[in-house]
Structures are given as structure tokens and as C-alpha cells.
Amino acid sequence: MESGYFGADRSQRIARERVQAQWMDAYAPIRHLDPVLVLIALALSVIGIAMVYSAKAHQLQLQQLPTDLYATKQTIALAVGMVALLVTATFDYRYFRAYAIAVYVGSLLGLVLVLTPLGVEVNGTQAWLSFGGFQLQPAEFAKVAVIVTLAALLHERRETPGIVTVALGLVIVGVPLLLILQQPDPGTATVFLWLAFALFLVGNIQARYLGAMLAAGIAGVWAVLRFELLAKHQVDRLTAFLDPNNPALSQSIRYNADQSLIAIGSGQFLGKGYMDGTQTNLAYVPENHTDFIFTVVGEEFGFVGATIVLGLFALLMWRGIRIAMMAKDLFGTLLAVGAVAMIAFQVFVNVGMAVGIMPVIGIPLPFVSYGGTSLIAGLVLIGLLLNVHMRRF
Amino acid sequence: MTTDERPTLRLTLLTVLVAGMLLALLSRLWFLQVLAGERYAELADSNRVRFVVLDAPRGRILAQDGQELVKNRPAQTVSAHPRDLLDLRGEPLDEDAARVLDRLSVLLDLEQDRIVERLLSRKYSPFRPVPVAEDVPREVILAVNEHKELFRGVEAETLPVRTYPHGTMAAHLVGYLGEINETELTEVEYAGYRPGDLIGWAGLERTYESDLNGQEGLRKLEVNAKGDVLRVFEERPPVRGNDLVTSLDLELQGEVERILEEGIIASREIERKDGRFLPSVAGAAVVLDPRDGSVRAMASYPVFDPSQFVGGVTQGYWDFLRDAANEYPLLNRAVQSAYPPGSVFKIVSGSAALLGGLITTESRISCPPAWRLGNLTFRNWSPRHEGSMDLTRALKRSCDTFFYELARQEWSREEAQPDDQVDETLPRVAAEFGLGARLGVDLPSESPGVIPSREWRKTYWEQHKDTYCRKAEELTPGSYAQRVNADLCRDGGRWRGGDAVNRSIGQGDVLLTPLQVAATYMAIANGGTVYAPQVGERIVDFDGTVIREIEPEVVSTLSLTPAQMAEIRRGLEAVVMDRTFPSGTGSSAFRDFPIETIPVAGKTGTAELRPKVPYAWFASYAPANDPQYVVVVAVEQGGGGSQTAAPIVRSIYDAIFDLGDTEFEEGPRTD
């Protein structure tokens, strides 16, 4: 009987366990890695390194510095970012809910530290922490932290997404936002407002609260203009793009935007060729390795190249939204939505300011702009997307 | 979690939003790169391509032996590109530009407003940086070049500017430069010039502008945003202006200027009969070569400093030059001032008498101390009766009454002729001497002088009749001035005997420039040819190849016979060399002069210009038997010609013939 049991059942059990193992194997997270997503992120990062090299090589040569100075730093950041991506993808994302608060507090700590004398000021904004040659931008990590924390909150209170949830959510967004305004970096601050809106939208917050938020935003902009809460030149800088032919606006306000338009426009359909952009080589576009990196793409690769880069972003977002759709729980959906929303917003604002349909506010182009923290944070978001995708069953 | 819990609808909303953003970007890119791409491509080119004007050095002005009167020196100049620093309203472009302007202001010790003013000035070419400060110290240039990052849009350049190795020497001849003005820009002569270009404003710089001016070059560069030049696309090198070689004897020029100035100043020590001193306010000296009319030296006193015009004359110096109290130093009196010539004119009236057949070389006319015409008395300068004399002696003693008598005879003869065909002898002969019109010297603003004639008198009266008539009514009836004006009002257009008498001794309305007087003596000296005096001799390019010879130009020739000419020459020689009593009026100034080896001929002149002190003249040539130099000196309010002018001329001959310095020594008061 025993033998019978073992005898007869053993083979059955082996067969059953084999089926089970096959089943388990089929649902193993690693089998559900999204290679397209990884490849796009890698492609954009490599394009970014190439663009940074082109943007800086001539100037570095003039300064008798190694021409690949920036490109090398960016490559190191890419390597670090890939490790961060793997780490983020490895541990089940559902655990992140428990650690969300810790991550959030940690990122706030970074934002506070950057305002102390430990922070480094560049172009009037104190946004960097410096560690022995490496510089870190805490705000980039804060974006990720806010996505995770907000997603956790909305998941936690998914049964009662009322006014209390909205209030808590606004606090979560508001604290880092106010800290970032102290740097001051209003551009990055707008990303947080947008993240709150996108996550509230998908996180089933009632339409009336969303409407109220939109109305408050519009009223806020109106109040700023009406009561002159910003200095004249700050307002001019923000509204200059609406009126490109106004000679009263001093040249310095329009200079970046004008030169950027000239760079992109002069690329025409096919571009001037890699390393052959005159605006790029002759440094007519300031910050063309960071905020205005898209001018290098537009000038040297023309409409075709610009479309390809935007196409890669479109693919990336499509994959992200698909992952949001397929996620096992609301937390996963919201993580994916947060990642997609952040990337989409930054692409729109960054490229928008380069082509003159958005005000010039300092927001990097994800994966492409020079800046290690931004690249690593972007890859962490890809890691989150992969994580959600791998564990959708 | 079940499927319907997933917020599909809201996700779709977000997706649409994101897709809309991407579409907006794509359509904008299509517009920029495909529809408007060409325009932006042009803008990109205009960004990186910069044209730089390369200044062409102006040609030099050289003395006959090749010594430099005017040359160029490199001037360290700080310039700035206005569009790198200022916006259209003249405000600093940005904070960085404001800081650059602050630094410039401190570095150049120049008010920021002044810098902005120059940067905005429209007179500068848009192709070149605007000069903000010229002739800055070397340290400033180093500071700008070593800290380019602190001086965005600022350039330290070396520009060629005029320099005068001999200081004020020949300033009136050389002239000076100034910026072309709007009127000149429209003139054909200055086609191709641009605002901000320097042109000759005076002197040879002006006359020979087209030869001296070089052709500026143009460089097409690729520049980056910082203004660093990365590549030269093409370059048209500047062409240096040609040099002007003059006939000036530099050493003599210096001596003549010194002697004129010292003589004028020394003459101010001379006390007049009324106890006052001679004013001797100004003067001129001319040294010509009578063989071709070339100018060997020319001086005008007071002088100015042409180097003050380099980089723009200061208001203070300009005011100084324009102040009447300073006797207008810019005036080249040798060419631009016409004075009554007084007795130096007697060779012209003498020639007229000979050519008009009033006298022959044998004729003798009485020389009384006073001579009457109707109820008017005209006096000789000498109170004693000098007896009867021929033309030679009349010149030697400068007898006025001799010429009065000739003038009366000429006038009577002309009055007898029909009104519409009067043959006026003196104006005709004066024209043979080139008088009454510009000689055509290669110096600007030459005065034509005045040789009064019947027609001149009529025209002049018509222009001034109203003034005479008004004064005749306004002035106290019966006063001398009122009677004169009333007479002029009624009948001032008529050429009267008195006019002819005054004219014969270079008074009345006769006006000649020192250069015209020199030309007159040149014609007597060389046997009858009036050349247009010329300073320029030839134009050569930078390596000395002759581009153009400036040939002597004959203005006119005298119709005097050799015998008549000889008569006049004998008279002029007697003035200087005849010491038998009563001696020649110019002889005492040439006491101790080696006239045996270097015979000198000349004529004194003392021109009345009431109420001023008379103008002193001495006109001469030497050696009298083979004339190589014509020397004329005129001193405004310098008293008698023999007193002030003749000693100056004598010193000039000392310098010419290397006879050692002579102190200015007052001559006797003759005529």
C-alpha cells in the first residue's frame, strides 16, 4: 500500500510536480522581463552619450581638455544606472510599499541637505550635493520617491479615495516641492505638481477634486501674473516664447530660445551630420549638453533624427502604459503611471522649450541630457516598470 | 484585484494626453525643420560668419629727400562689439554685459555713459568693433587680452593712426584728418567711403585724399558664440595708400618756421611813434623755386598741432583754435588769407604802365612828397622831394607819387574810351601775373584775392549799395562818414580816379595772398612764366615705384619784353643792393649780406588797412642773376616792410645759403 501509494502516486506526483514546475517556471519573474523596454532605455542613453559628446567636444578641445570628458562621466553614470535598474527590478515591488515612507524621508533629507552649505550652487540654483568628485541631484531621486510614496498611499486608501486622501497626497507632494522651490528650481517643482495630477487621475480620485486642482492651478498662474509675485524678468522669461518677435524683450531673455530655434530649424530634414552642427560646435546654444540637448539632435540629425528620438520615447511610454494596464494591483499600475507620466512630462517640456512652444525652465530630457543623477533616476524608473511587468501574475 | 477595478478609462485619458503632447512636438518640428528650415539655416550662417574690416594704412607724406613729415604709428585701441553688450534700447544685454561695461569703465577710466554713447553711435561701421578708447597704455591691452572671459565682446586692436615725427612742422601744409560727415558721404568724390572713415580735412591730406587713402581689406571669419575666431573663410588684404613726395626742404621748412616766429615775436618789441608796440599778430612766409613753382617751404604763424586731431580733437583744443583771440591758428595764411599788398604790388602796376605804353624804360616822372588829384591830396611815404626818376629808381625808392601819376594817366585814357569797351590795362596785366583768381596751388581753400576793376567796382557796389544808403541816413548828417556813405550810396558804382590811384600802390581794394605775391615775383625772376605753386611732386607706392609725377603747371606767361623785364629786375635789385644815397628801401636789412656772391632782388611793402597797424611785406628772389628762390614774408600789423618783413626774409636767406644765424634786427622805417 505504501509502496503502492508511493509506487503509483510517486510517478503521478513527479508528473504533477513537473507540471507545477513548468507552470511556476512560466510565471517566474525573470521570464517576464520586457526586453523592448530595456533596449529602448539603453538606446536613448547611448544616443544621449553621443549627443553630449558632440555638444561638448569642440569646446573642450578649445579649452585643451579631453573631448570625451562629459561623455565618459555619462557612461559611468549609465553603468551605475544599469546596476540600479537591476536592483530595482529584482525585489518584488510590493515590498516597496512597506519601505515607501523610509525612501520618502530619505529623499527629503537629501533635499534639506542640499540647502545647507553642503549643497553646490550652479547657475544660481543650489541643487547639487558633492561627494569627492561626484555630484548628486537629490531632486531627481525625490521624484522617484514621491511616485512610490504617492502610489503606496493611493493603493492603501483605494477603498476611500476621498478628501483625506487628496490632502495626504498633497502633503506628500508639497513638502519636497517647497524644498525644491528654496533652491530655487521652479522647473523641477512643476514636475511634482504634474505627478500629483497624473497619479490622482489614475488613482481614482474623484473628478471634482481633480477639477478643483486644475482650477487652483489656473488661479495660481493668474495670481502670479496679476499680483506680480515674480520679478518682471522672471515673468518675461516664462512668457517670452509666446511672443518671439517682440523686440522689447531684451535679447538675453530670448537668446537661449532664439539660438535653440536656429539650431533645430537649420537642421532641416536630414540634419547637418553628426559633429557637424555649426550652432552646436560654435557654442551658440548655451547648456546644449543639458537642458538644450535636443538642439544637438535637431541640428545634426534633422527632422528625421528628431522624429526617431521622439519615436523611441513614444515606444517607451507605450510599453509603460501597457505595463500599467497589466499590473497586478493598483500600486503597480500607479508606479507605472508615475514613471510614464514623469518621462512624458519631461520630454514634452524639454523638447517643447527647445522648439519654442514651452517656456524655458530647466528640465532635463530623460536618459539623453547630461547629468548622472537624472540618468540613474530614469533607469530606476525603468527598473520599477520592469518589476511591475515581471510580477503581474 | 479584478479587471474592472483597474482604472482603464482614466489610463486611456492619460494616454491620449501624452499622445497629444508628442503630436504637438512633432508638428512643431515639422514646421521648424521642414517648412521654415531654410530661413533658420541662413540665420545659423549669419551667426557664425563675421566680417572684419582691415584698415589700410594711409600713405605717408614725405619731404623731397624722403624724410617723413607724416607717417602712421600703431595705436593700441580698445574696441567693443555693440551687439554683444547692448540691446536695441542701449541697455546692457544681461548681467554679464553690465559687468563687462563696469570693468571697461574702471579699466579705461571712462564714464560708462560715454562708453555706451560711443557704442550706440551710428557713425561706425556695423562690420567692425567700435573703438571705445584710443592710445590706451599697454597694460590695458594686456589686461583685456589676458582676461578675455572678463571682457566678452571687447577687443584690443592695434590700429594705424597718423603721427607727426616733426611735431607741428609744416602743420598747415600737411593738414589733418577728421571723420567723414553725412554731406561728404553723398558726394561722388567720396564714393565707397563709409561712416566713421577718416578723410583729409585740410592741407595735403585733403588735396591728395584719393592717393593717400588705402583700400581697406575684408576678412570673412567663422566665429563661435564667444567671438573666438576658428577659421578664416576668405581674406581680401588691405591695400596701403600711396605716399606723397613733396618738394619741401624739411630743414629749410623748420628754419623758415622758426625765423618767422622769432621775427614776429621780436618785432613786437618795436615801439611805434605813438608809443605803442607793434602788434605783429600773425604772419606768413613762402619759399618757392621760381624755376618750376614748387614750394620749398611755407609757414604760417600762429601754428597748430595736427597730432591733436588724432583720435578726434578735444572740445577744449577746438575751442582754442576757433577763438578769435588766438588769431585762428588753423588758417594757412600763405594761401588762405588775402591782404592788401601795398608796394610789393608796384611791379604789377609798373608792368601795366610799360605794357600799356604809358612809359618806356627811359621815361622819367617826378616824385614829389605830395600829389593832387582834383581836390584830393595823395602823399608819398617820404617827406622829401625825390626828384625825377625812371621805373628802376621808382621801385628802388618805392615812390608812391610816381605810380599815382601813371594811374591818373591810365584812368584818364580809359575814361575816354566808350563805356562798354574799356580796355583796363592794370587788371589785364594783373591777370597775366595770375592775379585776381586762384593760382591752383595743391592746398585747399585757396583765396582768389581781389584785383579791383570797373566791373568789380560795379558788382561790389550793387551788393553793398543798401548798406551805404542806410548808413547815409542813420549817421549824423554832415559828419565825414555820413558824407562818404551818402556819396557811395549815390555814385559808388563808378570807378574813379582815386580808386585807380590807390590800386596802383597795392592799396584800395587790392587783396593778395602771400602765395600770389610770391607767384608774381616768381614770374619776374624766371623770365615771365607763372607756375601754379605746388607742394606735391610725385606719388609713389610703398616700395618707391612712381605712380604719378605731378607736373608743373603753367598758369600764364607775361608779355613783357626782355628789356622791360630787365628794367623791373634792375629796380628790385636796387631795392636791396643799391646803397648809394638815398639807398634802396630794403638795403639796410641786407647790410653785411654777401650780395657780391649772392645778389638779392626784392621789394618792401607797407600796406595800410586803417584803423589797423600797417601790414608789413617783403617779396624777393635770389640769387638775382640766377634765381633759385623766391621768398615772401607778410606780417599782419607788423608795421613797415623794411622794418619787420625784410629782416625776416634776410634771415631766411641766411638759412637758405647757410650763412649762419642772424639775430632779428629792426630795419629803418621806409615803405
Image (tube, rainbow, N blue to C red):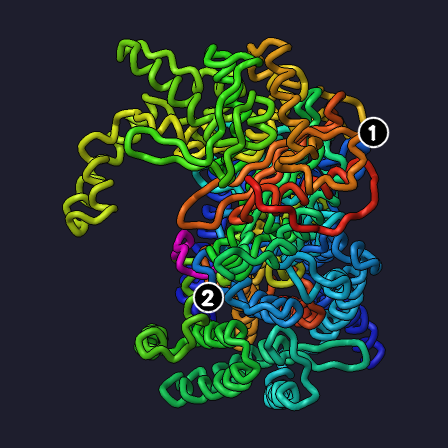
Asked if one can make out residue B554 in the rendered structure from this viewpoint, the answer is yes
Give the percent coordinates (x, y) of residue A195.
49, 74
Residue at 65%, 75% (x, y): give it: A122
Seen from the viewer's position, the closer of residues A2 and B193 is: B193
Quarter of the image containing the N terminus of chain A? bottom right
Amino acid type indicated by mark 2: Arg
Please name the residue that numbered disc 2 is placed on: A237
Asked if one can make out residue B44 in the rendered structure from this viewpoint, the answer is no
Label 2 to label 1, Cα distance in Å? 92 Å
Is residue B515 rendered to the left or right of residue B89?
A: right
Give the percent coordinates (x, y) of residue A180.
55, 82
Q: Which mark is residue B597?
A: 1
Quarter occupied by residue B51: top right
Is residue B170 rendered to the left or right of residue B113?
A: right
Is residue B169 rendered to the left or right of residue B32?
A: right
Residue at 64%, 63% (x, y): give it: A290
The chain holding disc 2 is: A
Give the magenta-colored segment's residue range.
A243-251
* Helix, strand or loop status at disc 2: helix
The chain holding disc 1 is: B
Residue at 47%, 74% (x, y): give it: A199
Quarter occupied by residue A168: bottom left
Quarter of the image containing the C terminus of chain A? bottom right
Query: Closer to us: mark 2 or mark 1?
Result: 1
Q: Main secondary structure of the magenta part?
A: loop
Residue A304 lies in the magenta stretch: no
Q: Is residue B201 above or below residue A64?
A: above
Give the percent coordinates (x, y) of residue B48.
63, 45
